[in-house]
Every structure is written in C-alpha cells, then in structure tokens.
Amino acid sequence: MLAKKPPMGWNSWNTFGPKVNEQVVREAADKIIELGLKECGYEYVIIDDVWMLPERDENHRLVPNPETFPSGMKELADYVHSKGLKFGIYSCAGILTCAQLPSSFQFEFIDAQTFAEWGVDYLKYDFCYKPHSFSAHMLYNRISLALRSCGREILLNSCNWGVEDPETWARNTGIHIWRSTGDIEDNWNSIKDIFHKQYEKSCFGAPGCFNDMDMLVVGMNGEGHVGLGGCSTTEYKTHFSLWAMQCSPLIIGADISKLSDEHLAILKNKEIIAINQDEDARPPQMIADWTNKDKFTLVRMLSNNEYAIGIFNLSDDESTVVTSLFDVGLPFDSGLAFELHEVWENKEYGKVCDYLKFTLPAHDCKIFKAKVVKQ
Ligand code: GLA
C-alpha cells in the first residue's frame, strides 16, 4: 500500500517557486542524505510547477525545459533513486498549470505513461484552470486510473485546496494525500489559519489516504517564494508539532542547504516524527479551552496503547491551558494515571491523574508522549 503513513520529503515550490532547476533538485537530494534526513524518514524529492516547456512535443508528450533541466527527467530520477530516494513531479487537472504551462487535462493517459517511463514515484496534481463543466472528482478519478494503468506505482497527491469537499471522495478516487486548504506562507498567521480551517477534516485521514495541510515552512526564515514574513523558532516548532499531530504529510519546503542547526533539529525530532508516522494513524481528538479557540489540547491514541498529548497556545499572549483528563477518558477513580514525557524538552513530568495545567508563551506548545500506568 502506498502512503500507509503520511509521506515525508522535500518539494521545490516554497523556496524556489518558478525558479526551480535540476541543480537545486540534485542538491536537495544530496543534502537529504548528508544531513541524515533520510534516516528520519524524508524520502520524496518533488519538483513542483515550472519544469516543462510551453509546448508539448509532436507526440503530445510534456517536455522538460532543456535550459533548466538539461539532463532530462529520466536521468534526474535515476540520480534521485541512486541515493535511495524517490522522485516526484507536478502536473495539474486543468488546461494549464497554475503557472500557465501545459497541463494534463485530456492528456492524462499520455502523461501517466511518460511519468512512468521517467521513473516518477509521486505526482502532485494541482487544480488551476480546470474547465468548469468537469467535476474535481471526475478529473481526479481519471488521473488516478491513468496512474494505476501506467505500469508503475505512483503516489497521487491531489492539490485542490479543499474545493468540492475532497474529504468525501479522495479515498474512493484513489488519491493518497489531498490538500484540504489553500497555499501556506512562511508566517504565523498562515500556519494558524490553515490549522483552524481544516481541523474538522482531519478525521477523514487514515492509512492510504491522508489530509495534507500543505508543505512545511520550517526553516525558511522569510526567504524564498512563499517566504512572506518568516517565523520564530518557537513558531516553527509549533507548526511542525501541529502538522505531526494531525497526521499531515511532512514535506520540507525550505532550502535544505540553508537550514540552521536549530531548524534542522526541529525537522529531525525523531519522537515528533514517530507520532506523525504512528502506524495506527488515528486522528487527534480536540479538547478546546472554554475561553479561547487558540488554546486547546490535541490527544492522539497511538499504537501500543500509548498516547500523544499536544498542548497548544496559538494566541498572541502568554496563556494557561487547562485540560481535564476526564475528557480524555481517564476518571480519577480508575486508579490510573498518565506518565508524561515531554518530547521537545526531553523531560519527564511524572504521573498525572486529574488535569494538565501549563502556562505557555505565545505561539508555543508542549508535546507529551504518555503511558497509562497505575497511580
Ligand atoms: C498552486 C499550489 C501550490 C503550487 C503552485 C504551483 O498554488 O497550491 O502548492 O504547486 O500552484 O504553481
């Protein structure tokens, strides 16, 4: 099964936008290995929009731009594969891509065949310039069937921003990850907005078909194509924690060669990644604070009867977040308690059997791994 767990990797768009080229893709693959990101689970190297020439060839096939991709896609895919990584590419359900280049509408079967010949493992399939008379469901069905009959296993990432309720048809269409909201920007408001907008959709994710909250902006520092403002290290930590708790794909969007040590450490936090990649892939329950929707606790049941508990303060002020363990199914008279280990601080918090109460700085969070033990 593809996407048994949320896919992890790197995508060119957030940093390089339309300036993507072969060199940055090769360098991303090199750095994923050099910096130990592959061992953490990052495996897909994905080229986003603006890799193709404005015209198809005489056989109606898409042609990589020879100025930016002189080796061609087969050779580039071979390079990525030689590192033990997987190769992803981009197209779109409409008549043009979002950057107005040739797209796959009415060429789905030719394009799937071309991608298979190049050695593509992952297709990000966007939604711009879609003819109004075709439903999203139908067009994603079509590319899905094209991929399933192309002779190669290719993961399908639908990027339709939540239009026409993809959570109701993504799974039956064969999509492996579906974007539920618009494009992320490298600033706190964008991160918060995405979380609030798609939270209620997270229950639709499960092995084989996950809700995608968009690529990560961790480590962009306000630079690159969507680097509009930048975030503090605390905000990047909270962003990564939210995506991990929500079972969203973890696709790095920063320039990997420019990551600072502290931002790299966020992306490499093995315990947070393990929560995201937990094989049960159960979505979190939200326990909201009574007073403010920016203060809440996310609780996920993990495999092996463990729990992940995320306490979040998305508000702009230092705040105290209180969570009754009663709401998590743990009455005091059960004789049981949660034994808490905080992942970011790598610190033990001992046993708790009544409530959690933490004062957090603005935009901060705590993520606990919890075991149910005797009081
Ligand atoms: C859309 C997508 C982005 C990116 C661009 C490329 O906006 O949502 O993730 O792929 O198109 O043009």
Image (cartoon, helix red, strand yellow):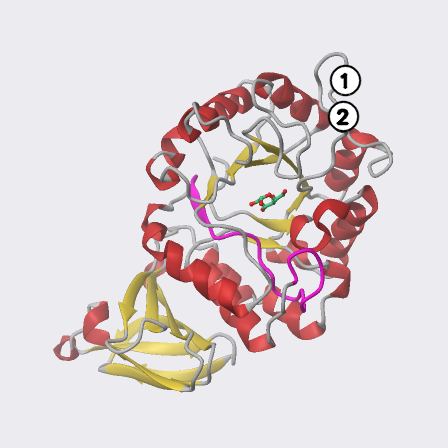
Q: Which mark is residue 80?
A: none
Q: Which residue is mark 1?
A: 57
At mark 2, the secondary structure is: loop
User: Between residues 147 and 141, which one lies in front from this camera angle?
Assistant: 141
Instruction: Verify whether residue 217 appears in magenta.
Output: yes
User: Between residues 137 and 331, which one lies in front from this camera angle?
Assistant: 137
Q: Is residue 202 above or below residue 67?
A: below
Give the extent of the magenta segment: 208-227
Q: Is residue 184 left or right of residue 284?
A: right
For label 2, the crowd category at 10 Å Cα-Cα, with few meaning under 14, some 14 to 19 and many 20 or more, is some
Residue name at image x 62 percent, y 52 percent: 42
Label 2, label 1: how far apart the Cα atoms are = 7 Å
Lower sequence index among marks 2 and 1 = 1
Q: Is residue 222 above or below residue 61?
A: below
The answer to whether residue 11 is seen in the rendering is no
Rendering quadrant holding ligand 1: top right
Q: Is residue 162 left or right of residue 52?
A: left
Which amino acid, mark 2?
Val
Residue name at image x 47 percent, y 35 percent: 1
**Residue 289 location in percent, x, y?**
27, 75
Q: Main secondary structure of the magenta part?
A: loop
Do the residues under discs 2 and 1 have CB atoms within 8 angstroms? yes
Q: Which residue is mark 2?
A: 63
Q: Quadrant of residue 226?
A: bottom right
Instruction: Kindly give the residue lying farthest to the front in the view shown.
Output: 132
Q: Is residue 332 above or below residue 60?
A: below
Q: How many marks?
A: 2
Which amino acid, mark 1?
Asp
Q: Is residue 352 left or right of residue 34?
A: left
